[in-house]
Amino acid sequence: MDDRPIGVFDSGLGGASVLREALRTLPHEKFIYYGDNQNAPYGDRTEAEITALTMRCAHLLADHGVKAILIACNTATATCIERIRSELEIPVVSVEPAIKPACMQPGTGKVLMMATRATTRLRRYLDLQARMPDPSRVINVPCPGLVERIEQGIFDEDAFDDILDHHLSAYHSMQIDGIVLGCTHYIFIRNAIRRYATMHFSGSCALFDGNEATAHQLARVLTEHGLLNSENAAGSVEFHTSSDPAQFQPVFDLLLRQPCV
Ligand code: DGL
């Protein structure tokens, strides 16, 4: 039994979608969330910049005395998860684009993998894609612009059509079997993406994300290391941001309360 908190971080609010799942799976744990909202989005930055920002988040949480780290950011994972693991002595679990379940879907259509520019270019992700039975089935779609709008607290179904048009119009009328939400922010606009996909693509367009699998992996790792909190303990979440808490805490609270769908 270990009642220390678990540290969770993301470039901003997107990681709340992973934390929401983790809370469902591990209701007796304490979580400390750090959103680097001041520096979001990470996805358009250089690898060196993302590494520096990510290492800062990880060390900040480790210095706070957390028992494990959950990287709730695909971009940070793709950039430097190995370095985080080598510099910290606590277990590190992370989210990754769910292209595997998307590629296991039967069908002859394509799989669209929507993520930040950085994730779609980085070696770690490209290696994951190369391990798919047919890597060419996956079309990587970097989607700059979405994270900025989500960070502003905008989630309306029709509020993203201009950006989605910009990134996805090349695939209109194609048969799309799956769409991977490869950035934790995109989970909060899944209705906007689903609506857009239904209007413009043929095929089932099933949506995939890695959050549930990540929460289960976190539970497994804590169990293996004997780090679970007592089952009588009440869970909790503490929010910290590198930006203005008065601006981001209310949106964070709202996102955390949304049901996982
Ligand atoms: N939410 C993040 C991810 O999963 C990063 C978004 C960004 O800061 O660009 O990739």
Image: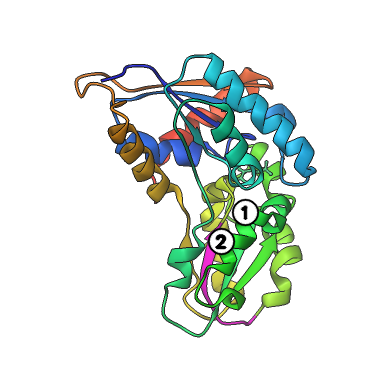
Residue at point 62%, 36% (across, down):
83
Badge 2, how many Cα within 10 Å: few under 14, some, many 20+?
some
The reply, left or right, for residue 206 in relation to residue 134 is left
Marker disc for residue 58: none
The reply, left or right, for residue 36 in relation to residue 190 is right
Residue 244: horizontal and vertical position, in percent? 67, 19
Residue situated in front as seen by the camera: 159 or 190:
190
Q: Is 233 rendered above or below residue 252?
A: above
Q: Which residues are magenta?
A: 173-181
Q: Amino acid at mark 1?
A: Arg
User: If the image is split into quadrants, where does the N terminus sit?
Assistant: top left
Q: Are marks 1 and 2 in contact (CB under 8 Å)?
A: yes
How far is the residue under mark 1 from the one under mark 2?
6 Å
Total of numbered circles in the picture? 2
What main secondary structure does the magenta stretch of the protein show? strand
Q: Amino acid at mark 2?
A: Leu
Q: Is 179 rendered above or below residue 2?
A: below
Disc 1 marks which residue?
Answer: 124
Q: Quadrant of residue 202?
A: bottom right
Residue 3: horizontal and vertical position, in percent? 32, 17
Disc 2 marks which residue?
Answer: 128
Element under label 1? helix
Element under label 2? helix
Residue at point 67%, 21% (across, down):
242
